[in-house]
Structures are given as structure tokens and as C-alpha cells.
Image (cartoon, coloured by chain):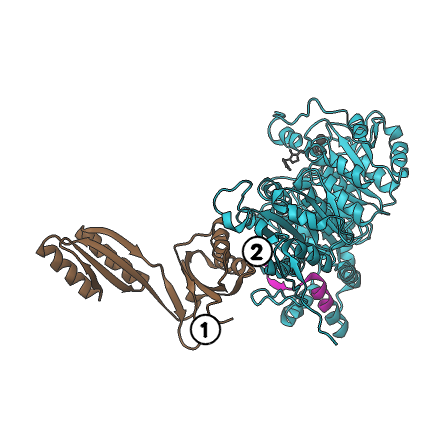
């Protein structure tokens, strides 16, 4: 029999072939001089669907949304110079939230690198602080290996974005080289560990089972490791309360009786109280960031801290852990469950009952309660209505601002990956392109982009992409005619001096949606909200832009008091005033 | 407190810039940095002298380790080690008095005069950073330094402990 021959391909063909063999389904991109050869190789290519966005930033957010919803690596292709620099915000967004992406950028020919050639930017340099790793490929025959490594690095360990910079001369269609895509990747300097050290696991389990007031504080690590089942089992087995970070929502069902809500700056009263009064904080895939801890010096003084994370740098970075456990969330939680099972360990159920009766008292404060009005729609009400109309099954992407917090607080996410937001970088403009990526991955699911009048305008051009590829997402624009979150801070901390937080001259969003070939609807009357929302979601094949005028004075509460303990909070009273 | 980190990493373009970038990005300081390939040409070894308390050092070590190009990181100052630095000092040597003084001091410090012109002596000195500093101090007091150049510290653990892939 004849041995399979190494095919001779051009660099451009290698790029496309590698992506195909690595299972890439969607490639979000935008062409330009440096990548014309790659685009030519993509022409009439069947296996990979290329989505032409209208701005490179949106390509990255769309790939990011796709990655967050599926757990697969998102893929992006852009040209050199401005195409590459336009991706920076998207890459930084993915980096902060540990999202696996591969960004392929064109580069000027190797022969002119460093000469300030037309559309030359040092992409590896520009992106260096915001990537997990990057490659500048210098020979065509190195392309498959670089791309295969990029995908491997992006998705393993703590996931993150990887840039592959491809100079134009190495993708020249006239020059062929042997194509070899490595099947197994072995990088001697990169060995992510997933299993926790048994000694640390034992210590952690002992602490967990002997604690009188334990809490499971979990973040995005549960989502990215698909460890939701393990987390829920552990919580149920020991009857321990669970709180999630903004990135961790859906890690345990939002309607689970042991879920005490999101914690941190806009966390529930009970979540922050549980944390402050805990004697053991069992943190998994969360990183004690400043939006959670409030003043680190006053952080949970009575708690012993067990910190499980796949990334050792996250452990003891801001808050010293008593028991560090390096390992993947899923693996470590399995080890914890195994040990509890094997050694037949349990915790004191009477103590837990006491703990829960305390927690139930905190819950009675009803910190998410708000007052409805017959005249004006309250933003919280919009999210509750969205939950009802979508049966709690929608993928919800969001932008950044008050609407984002309302979505996080008032839509209980039942499953991981349902909630898709820029938690770490807080990137306005993320919501719509991210929703496109999600909808492409799950065309039969509800996909709603909860946005604001400010944020939506940061990537509104993607309405055109949605039309071209038939991506019928629902845009829920919580319109308060202002940069609401900025305004809230100015109201609370700057004596109401609303410096540049008003959005004068907003476009007519309904007409704008129509101009892009979509359906626009507006609602201002609370009595009509549900009907309009149902109508919008009933239009399965249409993108509907729902412009909802809400009470512009609404604030997001609870809110931590700056510089205080984790549970120092301003609460809303039932009539909307501060307590 | 002064600490010395030894880093073993891939000898590839961009690897050094990732290390240097990490230090500036996260606000860690670099007192000195040396880099060159090792006996295995696919690897580079970096020695960085930095300052920080236990916590900072732990973070730096972990952050450096996290870089994909990095194989090994050790805090050298944790264990018995030898460290060396080279300094070259160029000095005015216009009259006999100056020449004598330079000669005398460099002998005391076991330095060597490695370049001589009618008016200039250049001395090479090898030793720990403290010794190098002490020598520069003495020469500065003599007031005839024209320029100095230091290599930055390199270090290696004592005994059979080695930083290997
Ligand atoms: C790209 C970017 N620029 C600025 C900010 C700062 N910022 C945070 S929230 C916000 C206001 C957002 O307004 P809008 O989208 O209308 O949401 P709202 O708070 O009104 O719900 C701003 C300007 C940001 N997060 N991202
Ligand atoms: Mg707004």
C-alpha cells in the first residue's frame, strides 16, 4: 500500500485547511490587503462559514459569545494594521474573562516588517499584555503547527485568547510547502495541571465538613470547566449555601433553594451577609476581585479560606488563602466529592440548620424588592418580564451599565453558559455581537441582548450583519436616555452633578432597526410591556429591536458602600428611597 | 528585600519581551536583568534581580511561571547560591598619583586593569553585587570615574541542584 503523502499547499491554503481540520465551524472576520490570499482560499469553501462583521471589534465579541455559549474556541480573521488594532478591545475583553479565542491577523510581508510599511502594526507587541500567548509565524510550513498550538493553548488550563500573526509573503498562493498538522500537541514549557494535590484536597474537605457557617463562593471557573453538576452535588450533599460572582451565574441554578444570589458590589443582602459571617469560604474558580471584596482589609475577618483555581496566580493575589488548591474546578470538585463519599464524612446537620435559619432572616429583607408604578416601566420589571416570556430558558447577553446589573440580578439563570456578559473588562458594545455568536451556535434557542441606549450604539452597525446572515436575536434596549450607571454614581457620589451622562439626540431606534431591515417596537406603558415582549419573541425569524422606555431615575440596589466591609450596603426601600 | 530569580525559557523571539512586559505591566521592579542562551541552545536563561516582600515574590514567581514560554522559575536567594557581577570602570589616570591610587584600589578589590591609554585606565572587577558597589563607591570618592558599566547579576545554586527542563 502507498503511504499517504504530505500534501503541498500554499500558506493561505494551510490556514484554511488547519482551521477545517481543527473543527472550526464559524470564522468571524473582515478582509483587507494582508489577508486577501487567505480570503481567496476561503472563497467557496464549504466546511467553514465565514461571517462578515461590520467592525473587527465585533468579530472578536461574536467569536467570544460563540465560545462562551458553546465552550469551544472562537475564531477570528482580520487584516493587518487597523484591522488588527480594532480587535484589541475584543481581545482584552476575552482575556479578562478567560475566554478561549484564536485571532488570526494578517501582517505585512516578513521582508518589510519593521519598516513602517503600509498597514503595519506590531500586533504581537500591541496585544502582548492581553493575550494568553501569541505567535508571529515566519515560514509557511510552520503555519499548521502554530495554529494547532494556538487552539490548544487557548482552550486548555485557564482558557484565553491567542493571537497568530501571519505575514503576507508566507501565505503567498504561488509558493507551496509541505502541510503537516500535528495531531498531538506537546509543549514542554506548558503543562497545565488539572488535578488537585490530594493532601490539599484532604485539608479542604476537613475544613468544609467541620465548618459551622460555610459558603461556596464560585465564579467563572465553574462555567468554563463545566463543573456545574459537581458544584450542585457538593452543595446539596452538605446543605451549604452557594453564592456566584457576576461571571459565575448559572454555575448553580438561579432558582435552586440553596442559591443566595450574586455577591459583591450589587450582590444580594443575603449573599454578602453570608460571606461576611462565614467561618469557611470555599472559593472555586473565583478570584476575589475588587468588585466582590470591597475593602480587602475588612474582608470576611472570621473566615478560613480555601481557594481552588486552575491558575495559581489567582490564589492569594488579593486575599491570602489558608488552603490553596491548584487544579481545574471540575476535577477538584470530583476529588472532593470522592473523598467525602469514600471516607463517609458528613457535616453537622444541626449546625447547618442553624446557619440556614440565620440566612432565611437575611432573605426576609428582600433586597431585590422594588416598587412598580402604573405610569412608568421599571427596568427591573423588564428583566422579570423577559424571564417570564422566555420561560427562563433564554441565552442572555448584555452590555455594560445598569441594565447589565438588572439582568444579572433579576433573571435567574438555570444553566451555565446562559448568561453572557463582559464581567472583567466591562466592555460597552459587547452585547449585540456576542448575541450573534450565540444565536449562530444555537439557532433554535431564544437569544436576547439586554442593552442600554448608550451601549447599543457602540456596535449598532452589526444590525447589518444580522440581516445578511439571518440572525434573529431580540434586542431588549432598556432606554433611560442616559448613561445610567454613570449617572447613578454622579447622583450618589458627586452631588447629582450629571456631567456628560445624558444621551441627548438619541436616534429613533425603531426607525433605525427598520432602516437596517429589521423589526422595531417601542413600549412605554407598563400595562403593554408583556404583550409587546411576547409579540417580539413570537417573531421567530425576525430580529426585533425592542426599545423600552423606563424610569430614568431608577438606581441599582443593593450597592456596597465604598471602602467598607463586603456587607456594608445601601439598600432600596420599598418606596424606592435609600435606606 | 533584594531577590534573585532564575528563569529558564524557550530561546525564541518575543520570549524576553513577555518577561519584561510582565514586570512593567504588573508594577514589579527590575534592578538588573541578564539573558543569554544556555548550553542547550534551544533554551535561554534569565537572571533578574528584583525587590519585594514574600507576597510580591510569590506573585512574580507565579506570574512568570504562567507565561507559556517559561519552563522553570526559581528564587535563587531562597537557597545557598553563588552570584557574580562584572563591572567595567573607566577612570581618569592623568598623573602618577591617580594611577597609583587606581592600581592600589583595584589590587585591594582584586580587579584588573584591562585597558590603558595616556590618560585613561579601565578596570574590570568581578564579584558579588555588594563588592561591585563597594568598589564603585571607593572610586567615586577618588572622584575620577568617567563611566561605569555593570553586567547585572548572574547566579547559580550551590551543589547539585540545577535548573533543568
Ligand atoms: C467602552 C466603555 N466606555 C465607557 C464605559 C463606562 N461606562 C460604564 S456603564 C456606562 C453607561 C452605560 O450606559 P447605557 O448603555 O445606556 O446603560 P445604562 O447604565 O443606562 O443601563 C459607561 C459609560 C464602559 N464600561 N465601556
Ligand atoms: Mg442608558
Q: In the image, ligand 1 is in what quadrant? A: top right
Chain hosting mark 1: B
Q: Nearer the viewer, residue B68 or A76?
A: A76
Judge whether residue B109 is colored magenta.
no
Of the two numbered discs 2 and 1 in the rendering, the one whose residue sits closer to the viewer: 2
In the rendered image, the residue lying farthest to the left is: B96
Question: How far apart are labels 2 and 1 at the CA level?
Answer: 33 Å
Q: Secondary structure at mark 2?
A: loop
The residue sitting at 77% across, 58% down in the picture is A228
Judge whether residue A324 is colored magenta.
yes
The C terminus of chain A is located in which quarter? top right
Q: Quadrant of residue A118?
A: top right
For chain B, what colour was chosen?
Answer: brown
Q: Secondary structure at mark 1?
A: loop
Q: Is residue A110 above or below residue A232?
A: above
Residue bounds of the magenta highlight: A318-336
Res A204 seen here: yes
The x, y position of residue A446, in whole percent, is 84, 44
Any idea which chain is the cyan one in this picture? A
Q: Which residue is mark 1?
A: B162
The answer to whether residue A311 is left or right of residue A376 is left
Res A219 seen here: no
Q: Nearer the viewer, residue A306 or A52?
A: A52
Badge 2 and badge 1 in a common chain = no
Q: Is residue A52 above or below residue A320?
A: above
In the rendered image, the residue lying farthest to the top is: A505
**Disc 1 crowd, CA 10 A, few/some/many (<14, 14-19, 20+):** few
The N terminus of chain A is located in which quarter? bottom right
**Disc 2 crowd, CA 10 A, few/some/many (<14, 14-19, 20+):** many
Q: Which residue is mark 2?
A: A137
The answer to whether residue A341 is left or right of residue B85 is right
Amino acid at each position: 500500500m502507498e503511504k499517504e503523502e504530505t500534501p503541498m499547499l500554499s500558506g493561505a491554503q494551510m490556514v484554511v485547511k488547519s482551521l477545517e481540520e481543527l473543527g472550526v465551524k464559524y470564522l468571524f472576520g473582515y478582509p483587507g490587503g494582508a489577508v486577501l490570499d487567505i480570503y481567496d482560499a476561503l472563497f467557496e469553501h464549504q466546511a467553514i462559514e465565514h461571517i462578515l462583521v461590520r467592525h473587527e471589534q465585533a468579530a472578536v465579541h461574536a467569536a467570544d459569545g460563540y465560545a462562551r455559549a458553546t465552550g469551544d474556541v472562537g475564531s477570528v480573521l482580520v487584516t493587518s494594521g487597523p484591522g488588527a488594532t480594532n480587535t484589541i478591545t475584543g481581545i482584552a475583553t476575552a482575556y479578562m474573562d478567560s475566554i478561549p479565542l484564536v485571532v488570526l491577523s494578517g501582517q505585512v510581508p516578513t521582508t518589510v516588517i519593521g519598516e513602517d510599511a503600509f498597514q503595519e502594526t506590531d500586533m504581537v507587541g500591541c496585544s502582548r499584555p492581553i493575550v494568553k500567548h501569541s505567535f508571529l509565524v515566519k515560514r509557511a510550513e510552520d503555519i499548521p503547527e502554530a495554529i494547532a498550538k494556538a487552539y490548544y493553548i487557548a482552550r486548555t488550563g485557564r482558557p484565553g485568547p491567542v493571537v497568530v500573526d501571519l505575514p503576507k509573503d508566507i501565505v503567498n498562493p504561488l509558493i507551496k510547502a509541505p502541510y503537516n498538522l500535528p495531531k498531538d500537541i506537546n509543549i514542554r514549557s506548558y503543562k497545565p495541571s488539572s488535578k488537585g494535590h490530594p493532601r490539599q484536597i484532604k485539608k479542604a474537605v476537613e475544613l468544609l465538613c467541620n465548618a459551622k457557617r460555610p459558603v461556596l463562593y464560585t465564579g467563572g471557573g465553574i462555567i468554563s470547566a463545566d463543573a456545574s453538576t459537581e458544584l450542585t452535588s457538593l452543595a446539596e450533599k452538605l446543605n451549604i449555601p452557594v453564592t456566584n460572582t457576576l461571571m459565575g451565574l448559572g454555575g448553580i441554578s438561579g432558582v435552586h433553594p440553596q442559591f443566595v444570589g450574586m455577591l459583591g458590589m450589587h450582590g444580594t443582602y443575603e449573599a454578602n451577609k453570608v460571606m461576611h459571617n462565614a467561618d469557611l469560604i470555599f472559593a472555586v474558580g473565583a478570584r476575589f476581585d475588587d468588585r466582590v471584596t470591597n475593602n480587602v482589609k475588612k474582608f470576611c475577618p472570621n473566615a478560613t479560606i480555601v481557594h481552588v483555581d486552575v491558575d495559581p496566580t489567582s490564589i492569594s493575589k488579593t486575599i491570602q488563602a489558608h488552603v490553596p488548591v491548584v487544579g481545574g474546578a471540575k476535577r477538584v470538585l470530583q476529588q472532593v466529592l470522592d473523598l467525602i463519599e469514600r471516607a463517609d464524612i458528613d457535616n453537622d446537620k444541626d449546625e447547618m440548620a442553624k446557619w440556614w435559619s440565620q440566612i432565611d432572616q437575611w432573605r426576609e429583607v428582600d433586597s431585590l424588592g422594588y416598587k412598580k408604578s402604573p405610569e412608568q416601566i421599571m427596568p427591573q420589571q423588564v428583566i422579570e418580564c423577559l424571564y417570564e416570556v422566555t420561560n427562563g430558558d433564554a441565552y442572555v447577553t448584555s452590555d455594560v451599565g445598569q441594565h447589565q446589573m438588572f439582568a444579572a440580578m433579576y433573571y435567574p439563570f438555570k444553566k451555565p453558559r446562559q448568561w453572557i456578559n463582559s464581567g472583567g473588562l466591562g466592555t460597552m458594545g459587547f452585547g449585540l455581537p456576542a448575541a450573534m455568536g450565540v444565536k449562530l451556535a444555537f439557532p433554535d434557542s431564544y437569544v436576547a441582548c439586554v442593552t442600554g441606549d448608550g451601549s447599543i450604539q457602540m456596535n449598532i452597525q452589526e444590525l447589518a450583519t444580522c440581516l445578511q446572515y439571518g440572525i434573529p436575536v431580540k434586542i431588549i434596549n432598556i432606554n433611560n436616555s442616559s448613561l445610567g450607571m454613570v449617572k447613578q454614581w454622579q447622583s450618589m457620589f458627586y452631588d447629582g452633578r450629571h456631567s456628560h451622562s445624558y444621551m441627548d439626540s438619541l436616534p429613533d431606534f425603531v426607525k433605525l432597526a427598520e432602516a437596517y431591515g429589521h423589526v422595531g417596537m417601542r413600549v412605554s406603558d407598563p400595562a403593554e410591556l408583556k404583550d409587546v415582549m411576547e409579540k417580539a419573541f413570537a417573531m421567530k425569524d425576525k430580529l426585533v429591536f425592542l426599545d423600552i422606555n423606563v424610569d430614568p431615575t431608577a438606581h441599582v440596589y443593593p450597592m456596597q458602600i465604598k471602602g467598607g466591609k463586603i456587607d456594608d450596603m445601601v439598600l432600596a426601600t420599598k418606596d424606592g428611597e435609600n435606606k | 528585600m533584594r531577590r534573585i530569580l532564575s528563569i529558564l525559557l524557550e530561546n525564541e523571539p518575543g520570549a524576553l519581551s513577555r518577561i519584561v512586559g510582565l514586570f512593567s505591566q504588573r508594577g514589579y521592579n527590575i534592578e538588573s536583568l541578564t539573558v543569554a542562551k544556555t548550553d542547550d541552545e534551544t533554551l535561554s536563561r534569565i537572571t533578574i534581580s528584583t525587590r519585594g516582600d514574600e507576597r510580591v515574590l510569590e506573585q512574580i514567581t507565579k506570574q512568570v511561571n504562567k507565561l507559556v514560554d517559561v519552563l522553570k522559575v526559581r528564587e535563587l536567594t531562597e537557597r545557598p547560591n553563588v552570584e557574580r557581577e562584572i563591572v567595567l570602570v573607566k577612570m581618569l589616570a592623568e598623573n602618577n598619583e591617580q594611577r597609583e591610587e587606581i592600581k592600589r584600589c583595584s589590587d585591594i578589590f582584586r580587579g584588573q586593569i584591562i585597558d590603558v591609554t595616556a590618560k585613561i585606565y579601565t578596570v574590570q572587577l568581578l564579584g558579588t553585587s555588594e563588592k561591585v558597589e563597594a568598589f564603585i563607591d571607593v572610586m567615586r570618592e577618588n572622584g575620577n570615574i568617567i563611566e561605569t558599566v555593570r553586567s547585572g547579576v548572574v547566579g547559580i545554586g550551590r551543589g547539585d541542584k540545577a535548573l533543568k527542563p
